[in-house]
Image (cartoon, grey):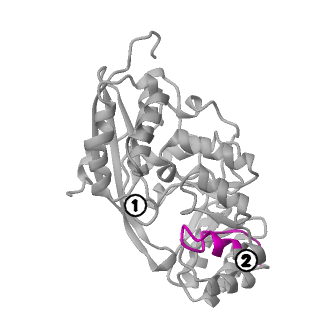
Amino acid sequence: MHTDATPLTIHRVEAIPVVLPLKKPILMGGGQKFDRSQTLIVRIEAANGLVGWGEASAAPTMTGDTLAGMVAAVDAHLGRLLVGRDAMTRARLGRELARAMIGNTGPKAACDLALFDLVGRHLGVSLTELLGGAVRDSVLTMCLLGNPSVEEDVAEAGRYHAQGYRFFKLKVGVKRVEEEIEAAFAVRKVAGAQAILCADANMGMSMEHARRYVAGVADAGLAFLEQPFRDADLAGTLALARTSPVPLCADESAHSIEAIVDWQRAGAIAGVNLKTIKLGGTAATLRAAVVADTLGLAVDLASKIAESSIATAGIVHLGYCIPNLDWGLSPTSHYLAADLVRAPLAPVQGGSPRPAGPGLGVDVDESAIARHRAKL
C-alpha cells in the first residue's frame, strides 16, 4: 500500500482492440443483430510496474465510436496526455481527458477507468472506496431478452428465472408489435408478479408502433419503455409520454448531464439509462447519477453489449455507490463466450456481488487479451 507522497508516474499507455464472441446473437431495436463484441482495452503502466486496466465498447450508433477510431484517439491524443503524469492526480487528469477531444467518450471512459484501477491498486483500496463507499449491500441485476421469436424469449426468461433473476428487459422494435405485446404478457407470467419487467427499443420504433405497444402492454406491469425513438427526437418522445401508461426512459438521448436535464424538464422521461461510454468515464457517470437523483429520475446503470469483466467490474462498483438504482444494473460480460480475466464476473441469484480486492478487483489475463486482439 502506498504511504508516502511519491508520484505514481505513468510510464506507458497502450490501446488494445479486442473482438470477443457472444454466447448467442442478441437482437436489438431496428433489427440490429450482435454476435460479437468490439471493445477497447486500455492498459496504463506506472513507472513502479503497477498496471491499471480500463475498457469501453465500440458503439457507432450510440456514441459514434468505432474500434479503430478509439485506438487512434488513445494513441494520438489521450495516451500522450497521460504519459509522464502523476496518476494520483486522477481528478485533474479526468478533466483534462474530457476536454482533450470533442466526443470520443468511449476511449475517454476506458482511460478514466484504467486510472481508477491503477490508483486503487497502488493504494490497496477498491474502486468502491475510491468513489466514497457503498450506499447499498446488494444490486439487482437485469437480464436481456432479445430473440427472434416470442417462444425463445419466454424460454430464456424461464431459464433466467430459475437462476434467481427477478429483473428482465425485452428488446422491442424488432418483431411485429402484436408479438411484442404477447411477449410482455408471456414473460410476465413466467417471471411472476413481483419481478421487474421493462422494454428497450434502441431507437427502433415508429410512433405508430410505440403507441400500439404501450397501449397493448398497459396491464403487463412494465416499469419503463426505453428509448423508443431516435436520440434527438425530444418532440416525439414528449408526445408519447403525454399519453403513455408506461413510463419512458432515455438511453441514447442521455449523452450528457445537460441532455438529461433538458429531457426531464420537458417532461419526456421518468428515468435514465447511464453508461460510462456515453458520459466519458466513471467519475462523470457518478456526477450524472447524482444529478438524475436530484431531478427525481429513476436510474438504470448499464454496459454496452458486450463488455468483458474489466468494464463490468467498473459498473458493478459504481452501482454500489450511486444514490439511486431503482431501475437496476445491466452488466453484459456474462453474455460473452470468452472473457479477459481469470475469474469472470457473473451474477449470483439475480444480483451482482461487489468484486473484492484493490482497484477493479479482477485479475486480468493478458494472454487472453493477446488471443482476442483484433487486427485493424
Amino acid type at mark 2: Lys
The residue segment tinted magenta is 220-238
Q: Residues within 10 Å of mark 2 (few under 14, many from 20)?
A: some
In the structure shown, which secondary structural element does the residue marked by tag 2 occupy?
Answer: helix
Residue 354 has which mark? none
Q: Are marks 1 and 2 in contact (CB under 8 Å)?
A: no
* Closer to viewer: mark 1 or mark 2: 1
Q: Which residue is mark 1?
A: 64
Q: Which residue is mark 2?
A: 189
Q: Is residue 329 visible?
A: no
Q: Is residue 94 above or below residue 305?
A: above
Residue found at x 47% / y 37%: 360
Taking the view exactly as shown, the residue that stands out farthest to the left is: 375
Q: Residues within 10 Å of mark 1 (few under 14, many from 20)?
A: some
In the structure shown, which secondary structural element does the residue marked by tag 1 occupy?
Answer: loop
With 315 as the anchor, is 328 left or right in this view? Answer: right
Q: Where in the figure is residue 260, as x and y percent of width and height?
A: 63, 55
Q: Where in the figure is residue 116, as x and y percent of width and height?
A: 46, 33
Quadrant of the rendered structure where residue 268 is?
A: bottom right
